[in-house]
Amino acid sequence: MYFLYLKSIHIIFIVTWFAGLFYMPRLFIYDVEARSKNEPENRILVNQFRIMQKRLWFGITWPSMILTLILGPWIVIEADHIQWSDRWLIIKLCLVVGLALYHLSLHVIFKQLGKDIVRYSSNQLRIWNEFATLFLVAIVFLVELQNELDMLYGILGLLGFIGVLMLAIKIYKHKRLQFEKNQTGS
């Protein structure tokens, strides 16, 4: 029973970590887009997004990552059916390292925006935002199926879906710009 509680708490912190990883880039996008607005709206929005980013990052995302990374190895130690030498587990650990590096990349962007350094457009941040989804899908397929080939199929399906979604977004953006252009009479 103890093991199931440990596993449940681990899953809860995985969910909250991913919630932060999904929402933080959205806040970056809003922050970058707010900077193109006129004063005082620009400064008001940027300041509000900074507060939201700080609370999310240090109140939820960082603590969730730390607890996830503590509880994960603890589960492997406690589990009778999982061995450190299991190939799927080694791949999962590599993906978790990649996810932690992604987390750190968001921290760099967080620090840059806090210093009013904007290195990425909102479109670049939208693309960067999708990497958390790739990690999530890969890790879930790998843990549940414990098979690398099935994980690969899941990732390829997701990439195809993302490609279709990106195309739809591009078409929508083009149509919206055409509509706005027609409304202004330009």
Image (cartoon, grey):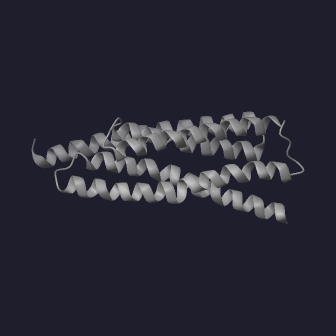
Q: Nearer the viewer, residue 157 or 136?
A: 136
Residue at 58%, 53% in the rendered image: 17
Left-right relation of 150 to 125:
right
Left-right relation of 135 to 109:
right
Q: Nearer the viewer, residue 96 or 87?
A: 96
Q: Nearer the viewer, residue 39 or 58?
A: 58
Looking at this view, name the residue that lies furthest to the front: 115
Can residue 168 be seen by looking at this rendering? no
Q: How many marks?
A: 0
Examine the rendered structure and indicate whether residue 24 appears above or below residue 186.
below
Q: Residue 147: x, y in percent?
A: 77, 38
Residue at 35%, 35% in the rendered image: 119
- Location of the C terminus by quadrant is top left
Examine the rendered structure and indicate whether residue 146 appears above or below residue 16.
above
Can residue 21 be seen by looking at this rendering? yes
Q: Residue 93: x, y in percent?
A: 71, 39
Looking at this view, name the residue that lies furthest to the left: 185
Residue at 61%, 34% in the rendered image: 156
- Location of the N terminus by quadrant is bottom right
Q: Residue 75: x, y in percent?
A: 79, 52
Q: Residue 134: x, y in percent?
A: 58, 40
